[in-house]
């Protein structure tokens, strides 16, 4: 093949011109800003009809709630499909394929499909699923966008903590991974066609340049990087990458695939999550202060959920990523809706659930 013909082959349209619906996979570690970025996509879709498939670790459905409430005309509640039965990379055959098939059978097919993986998902099995016979004739992966929490990278969250890994291994000698967080971070970067360095508002130019260098060292591939705050990247940059990533999956192997070519199953045993119910809260500021202490004491990676505040007609959305806790009233409680306070807690396996529950409910 000459250089010219090989270049022409590279430019072959994978999506629209082949009649396939383009699907964008949005991945990235817990709390990186995936849902925030998708909200931005929906609000700036300019008439493009988008169907969303979202998958969350921890069964509270917070992301779905946030996205359904975003009021975008081109993405109604029917267009938001939540996969709550575990992490999408482990439930491809049972959950993802049937969901995609049902979506494709709808009379009113979407112009574009956006898939948000859970923050703990390994994107590779999901991308490979686009090669399944029923799917590959109808849909193609337009691109994989990996969202990075730049502040967390700067804080060393994805650099190996040798003491912690050693402690984990003492607690569970079946652990064969060097560091589950670091590996997953790198696997998500390795899957990327585009990397979004998000949360730039939390860093100065020097810090951001260091993050850019560090991210570049974490994958042998060299996907483009864009910087963003609040996931604000033009839709024209995110959608329409036209890569056909499912055809390149062999070049994006995860640590897990490289270590276990023999086919050992991937799972999420290294991580743990549970939901804690609380009573109504009298003082949200005091709750937020307490959350920060509990997160630090137990090294909780992610905590989110809804809280009923005494005397308030709206529910309080709590979003914590590491030590940073955001909270705001997102919408009024609906008539007849149970005013429950529930928080999902996610961390490395071995979280002291009883102690965390006691502290949260105190
Ligand atoms: N300061 C700052 N906060 C951000 C930015 N983007 C998102 N956040 C906040 O980070 C938190 C997590 O954002 P999400 O969009 O829910 O992150 P996610 O990747 O969908 O999280 P999971 O689905 O739980 O993995 C929320 O409190 C957001 O408001 C940003 O650019 N800057």
Image (cartoon, rainbow, N blue to C red):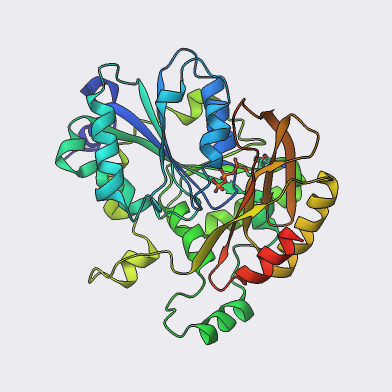
- The answer to whether 251 is drawn above or below residue 170 in the figure is above
- The answer to whether 51 is drawn above or below residue 297 in the figure is above
Q: Where is residue 169 in the image (x, y as percent from the top left)?
A: 51, 83
Residue at the front extreme of this rendering: 336
**With 320 as the anchor, is 86 left or right in this view?**
left
> Which residue sits at x=40%, y=50%?
191
Q: Quadrant of residue 201?
A: top right
Q: Quadrant of residue 347?
A: bottom right
> Which residue sits at x=60%, y=48%?
31
The one nearer the camera, 263 or 84, is 84
The one nearer the camera, 291 or 150, is 291
Q: Position of residue 102 (x, y in %)?
A: 25, 31
- The answer to whether 348 is drawn above or below residue 229 in the figure is below
Figure quadrant of the N terminus: top left
**With 145 as the anchor, is 215 left or right in this view?**
right
> Which residue sits at x=41%, y=24%?
78
Figure quadrant of the C terminus: bottom right
Q: Position of residue 100 (x, y in %)?
A: 28, 35
Q: Where is residue 140 in the image (x, y as percent from the top left)?
A: 28, 34
**With 299 as the anchor, is 99 left or right in this view?**
left
> Which residue sits at x=53%, y=46%?
60
The one nearer the camera, 65 or 326, is 65
Residue at the top extreme of this rendering: 47
How many numbered callouts?
0
The one nearer the camera, 215 or 285, is 285
- The answer to whether 125 is drawn above or below residue 239 in the figure is below
| Ligand 1 - quadrant of the structure image | top right
Mark yes or no: residue 26 visible.
yes
Mark yes or no: residue 37 visible.
no
């Amino acid at each position: 093949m000459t250089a010219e013909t090989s270049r022409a082959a590279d430019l072959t349209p994978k999506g629209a011109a082949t009649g396939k619906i383009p699907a964008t996979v949005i991945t990235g570690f817990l709390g990186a800003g995936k849902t925030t970025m998708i909200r931005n996509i929906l609000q700036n879709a300019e008439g493009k009809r988008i169907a969303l498939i979202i998958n969350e670790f921890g069964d509270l459905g917070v992301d779905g709630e946030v996205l359904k409430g975003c009021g975008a005309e081109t993405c109604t509640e029917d267009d938001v499909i939540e996969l709550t039965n575990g992490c999408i990379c482990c439930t491809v055959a049972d959950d993802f394929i049937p969901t995609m098939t049902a979506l494709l059978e709808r009379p009113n097919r979407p112009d574009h499909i956006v898939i948000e993986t859970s923050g703990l998902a390994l994107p590779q099995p999901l991308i490979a699923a686009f090669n399944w016979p029923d799917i590959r004739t109808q849909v193609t992966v337009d691109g994989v966008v990996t969202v990075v929490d730049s502040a967390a990278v700067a804080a060393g969250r994805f650099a190996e903590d040798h003491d912690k890994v050693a402690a984990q291994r003492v607690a569970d000698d079946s652990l064969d991974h060097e560091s589950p967080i670091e590996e997953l971070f790198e696997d998500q970067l390795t899957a990327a066609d585009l990397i979004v360095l998000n949360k730039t508002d939390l860093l100065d130019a020097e810090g951001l340049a260091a993050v850019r260098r560090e991210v570049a060292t974490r994958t042998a591939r060299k996907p483009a990087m864009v910087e963003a705050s609040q996931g604000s990247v033009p839709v024209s940059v995110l959608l329409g990458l036209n890569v056909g990533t499912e055809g390149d999956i062999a070049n994006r192997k995860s640590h897990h695939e490289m270590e276990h070519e023999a086919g050992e199953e991937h799972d999420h045993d290294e991580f743990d999550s549970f939901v804690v119910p609380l009573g109504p809260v009298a003082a949200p500021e005091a709750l937020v202060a307490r959350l920060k202490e509990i997160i630090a004491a137990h090294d909780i990676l992610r905590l989110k959920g809804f809280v009923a505040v005494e005397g308030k007609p709206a529910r309080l959305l709590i979003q914590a990523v590491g030590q940073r806790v955001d909270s705001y009233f997102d919408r009024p409680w609906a008539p007849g809706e149970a005013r429950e306070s529930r928080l999902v807690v996610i961390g490395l396996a071995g979280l002291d659930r009883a102690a965390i529950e006691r502290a949260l409910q105190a």
